[in-house]
Each structure stands twice: as structure tokens, then as C-alpha cells.
Amino acid sequence: MNLPILTTCAAFLCSTALADEIWVTNEKDDSISVIDIETLEVVRTIETGERPRGITFSKDFSVVYICASDSDAVQVMDPNTGKILHDLPSGEDPEQFVLHPDNRHLYIANEDDAITTVVDTETRTVVTQIDVGIEPEGMAVSPDGKIAITTSETTNMAHWIDTETQTLFANTLVDSRPRHAEFVKDGTELWVSAEIGGTISIFDVATQTEKAKIDFEIDNIHPDRVQPVGFEFTNGDSHAFVALGPSNHVAVVNAETYEVEEYILVGRRVWHLEFNRDRSQIFTTNGVSGDVTVVDVASRKALKSIKVGRFPWGAAFRPTE
């Protein structure tokens, strides 16, 4: 079902003091729900291509990129009008992507083709396609832009790409079905979540060797349901908030000791997370319950559940001033 574009006067056109926003992709509705961070309400619903998943903004927030997986396209949208400006060539079934620090090149995981596609967003052309493992999913790029990472769900690897030569220089094993990757601590560490393995592996970037592994265990929940997917870091990379899939919880991990400090109950089948501007709140996309949970970072308490579209998946922050 496609939803109409909603443009309410109070929240969109007529306000002179617009609040910051969280943009959420809804897989089953082919839409984006836009949440006003001040009111914690959905103020716009915008049509997209088929099965939107990954979402990210350009560095100046002038455009938003959307992985329309079943449309085999990365769509480029004007966030002010909700209009699709054009599609980028992306390869088949784009899942996640990451924008290089140069604000020009997108690194895209193509699940069906076992490749990473590099696209120049200015010329709208494919720079290269890099063979990786089977069912690539997660994407990350180092803060200095020198390394890109693709995770492959079936090969169970993180693939290390030299962005200058656009070639693989290392492949590291992780646990079963890696989904998400992030560089932290000024790019010295790489974290990779393994959904079925139930772990996060932490690598030393300089040597590509594993330095730690985090396990998760929630009372009265079967281990098979504790499935880490997306995660995000607080200011200073002191803690990670980790979405644990069908366990319906988010874990709070000390990023120095690698110990789990707390579990927070959120909505059903939590996929990904995104912070507000000062990282005092984090928003979780809960696929099965079709909502977003707002969590207070300091108290580690769920504040509110916001109904969005069917099967919310990705999330991205947008400042409005």
C-alpha cells in the first residue's frame, strides 16, 4: 500500500521554528515517516520506491539517499518537498550504504549480486563494482575515508576495501550473519554485529585482528531471539546502544570494558537506531510492532512509542535549522 504525501501546515509549511526530525523507512508501505523530535509525532509521510531500507543524508542535509531495495535503485530526494529528484545506479537489491567523507561517493551493498557498488553521486555513474562475499548487507567507512567495510551475511565476513584503489586488502571472519558495522574511537576500532551468532566482534583496524567479542544474555528470553543488528554510539564513544532484534530489547554496552550494562525493553523486532542532535535521546525502529521507541539516554528508560508505517527499518537524523 502506498501512502499519500502529508504536508500539514503546522508542521511543514507554516512553522517558522521547525523542530529537528528523525526519518524512518517503512519496508512494507514503501514510505518514509518523518518524526518531529520536539512533539514526538509523525508530521509527514512520504512515498518512496519499493521496500525502502537504508537511508542517509548528504553532509549538508540538502538531499536524502534512500535504498529502494525492490526497485533496484538508490533514490535521491529533496527533503524539503519530498520529491524524488532522480535515481542513482545502484546494482541489484541495495540493502545498506554509506556516504564517503568526500560527500560524493556512495558505497552500496548489493545483496543479490555479492558486490559492493561505488557510485559517484555528482556524475550519477558507477565508479566500480567490487566482488565481496555472499549476501552483502552492512556498510561502513572510516573517518579518514581510507577504508570501507562490507559485511556478507552468508560468507560471515567483514571485507576491507582500500578506497583509493577500490580493492579488497583483507577479509576477516565474524560470527553468523553479520549485519552492521561501525568505525569508532577515531577509526582505530571496527565493530561488527552478527545477528544469528548473537555477538559483536571488535577489530583493531591497524592489524584487522579481533581484540574482543561481546555476548548478550537476557533473562527469560531464549538465546535464539537475542539477535544484534544495528548499533550506535553515544558522545565520546563511551557506550553503544545495540538493537537486539526479536528479543525486543536494546543493550547498553560499555565501549571501554565491552561489558553489557543494561537491557531496555522497546518495541517488537528492533532493527536500527538513531540519535537526536545532542544524543540525549535515541530512536529505535521496531519492525513487527510498526513503531519507534524513544529512549532517554541518561536514564536508559523508554519514554514513548510512536506509530509509524509497516515494518520500519532504517532511521536518519535531520536538523531543520
Image (cartoon, helix red, strand yellow):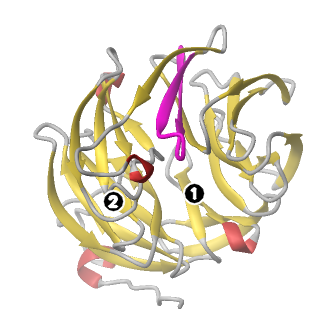
Q: Is residue 196 above or below residue 260?
A: below
Q: In this view of the protein, can residue 35 be seen by the observer? A: yes
Query: Magenta region: which residues?
Result: 188-203
Seen from the viewer's position, the closer of residues 127 and 172 is 172
* Residue 166, position as x, y percentages in the image: 85, 30
Secondary structure found at label 1: strand
Distance from the alpha carbon under mark 2 to that under mark 1? 17 Å
Marked residue nearer the N-terminal end (2 or 1): 2
Tell me what residue is drawn at x 64 percent, y 41 percent: 139
Q: Is residue 52 magenta?
A: no
Dominant secondary structure of the residues highlighted in magenta in the image: strand
Q: Residue at x 51, y 74 (%)?
A: 82
Residue identified by numbered label 2: 21
Q: Position of residue 162 (x, y in %)?
A: 78, 23
Q: Which residue is mark 1?
A: 54
141 on left or right of 31: right
Q: Is residue 238 left or right of residue 183?
A: left
The answer to which quarter of the image holds residue 86 is: bottom right
Residue 249 lies, with reference to residue 173, above or below; the image says: below
Q: Where's residue 290, x and y in %?
A: 36, 74
Amino acid carrying label 1: it is Gly
Question: Residue 123 appears at what percent x and percent y?
Answer: 82, 52
